[in-house]
Amino acid sequence: MTSEFIRLLNQGQYQTVMPLVEQALRQAALESPGRLTEVARSAVAWKGFFAGDTEARESEPWFRWLFAILQELAGIDSPAAHGCR
């Protein structure tokens, strides 16, 4: 993730950053599974998810959204997974 994404997350601007991260994840998925993994790892590595009780409550929708988009792009029902069967 870019420093801009991190800045927005640190400011609690989840609704602003979500479409930007989604675009980055979808682009990475089009490039390769390895690139998607790289971008996804940087997204889940953000330290603010569970920094404290307040942060945990505020970031929960972001965390759930991120899980859902990654499941769509790389999970068992993803196009990439279907190509491997």
Image: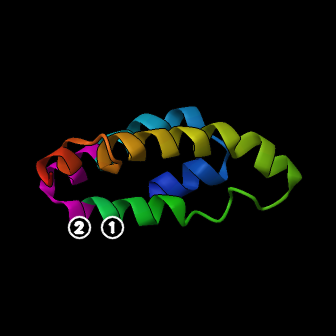
Label 1 neighbourhood size at 10 Å, few (<14), some (14-19), many (20+)? some
Q: Identify residue for label 1.
A: 38
- The residue lying at 47 percent from left, 39 percent from top is 68
Instruction: From the top left corner, tell me how far across and down residue 43 is, in percent.
Output: 47, 58
In-image side of 21 versus 64 (left or right)? left
Task: Name the quadrant containing residue 58.
Answer: top right
Q: Residues within 10 Å of mark 2 (few under 14, many from 20)?
A: few
Is 58 situated left or right of 77 in this image?
right
Evaluate whether residue 84 shows in this view.
yes
Residue in front for this viewpoint, 72 or 32: 72
Q: Identify the residue at horizontal 85%, vertical 48% (top origin).
A: 54
Whether residues under marks 1 and 2 lie with C-beta atoms below 8 angstroms apart, the answer is yes
Instruction: Report if residue 1 is visible in the image.
Output: no
- Amino acid type of the residue tagged 1 in the rendering: Glu
Give the prevailing secondary structure in the magenta stretch: helix
User: Does the magenta portion include 43?
Assistant: no
Residue sitting at the far front? 85
Residue with the mark numbered 2:
34
Q: What residue appears at the point 28 percent right and 58 percent down from the top-left corner? A: 36
- The magenta stretch spans which residues? 26-35
Left or right? Give the position of 76 relative to 53: left
The residue sitting at 18% across, 45% down in the picture is: 82
